[in-house]
Amino acid sequence: VQLQASGGGLVQAGGSLRLSCAASGRTFSINTAAWYRQAPGKQRESVAEISSGGSTNYADSVKGRFTISRDNAKNTVYLQMNSLKPEDTAIYYCTVDAYYYTDTDERVVFRAWGQGTQVTVSS
């Protein structure tokens, strides 16, 4: 399974970006999906997550500005980012907790990470 993140770029403060994370590979189902970010010199932090049922959680720093969503038919997760601030500058990573069944009906649970996409917000 591979995750391909896209949509990052350079934007002015107050602007918007929409990140996408497309999963591909063998047939599988996504449970929880999430976005993390890592700014230079800082630890990776959770930004937003969405459950299989659509419940969402956000870091306090992005509440009201970011929206996570998913398209199960496309195995794609999105992060709509509005009112961007310079402190949102970071590499954004998507991750999924997913599972698939083997030929012998064994359920295999795994976590996959995308390669990261750079978001830069200028002041």
Image (cartoon, grey):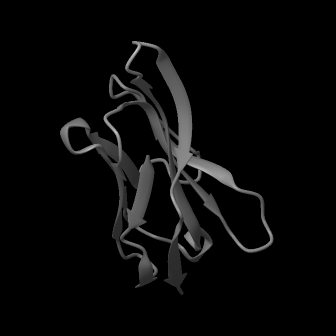
Q: Residue 47 location in percent, x, y?
A: 55, 50
Foreground: 78 or 74? 74
Displayed quadrant of residue 28: top left
Q: Residue 69 location in percent, x, y?
A: 32, 43
Query: Farthest left residue?
Result: 73
- Number of marks in the image? 0
Apparent side of residue 92 relative to residue 99 in the rendered image (left or right): right
Picture residue at 43% right of the left edge, 54% below the top: 3
Location of residue 91 with respect to 49 vertically, above or below: below
Displayed quadrant of residue 8: bottom left
Displayed quadrant of residue 80: bottom left
Picture residue at 36% right of the left edge, 26% below the top: 52
Picture residue at 58% right of the left edge, 45% below the top: 59
Apparent side of residue 23 relative to residue 87 in the rendered image (left or right): left
Foreground: 12 or 9? 9
Location of residue 41 with respect to 113 vertically, above or below: below
Q: Residue 72 location in percent, x, y?
A: 25, 36
Query: Farthest front residue?
Result: 103
Apparent side of residue 93 relative to residue 14 in the rendered image (left or right): right
Location of residue 101 with respect to 83 vertically, above or below: above
Picture residue at 67% right of the left edge, 52% below the top: 45
Foreground: 72 or 17? 72
Query: Farthest right residue?
Result: 41
Foreground: 13 or 116? 116
Q: Residue 23 location in percent, x, y?
A: 36, 49
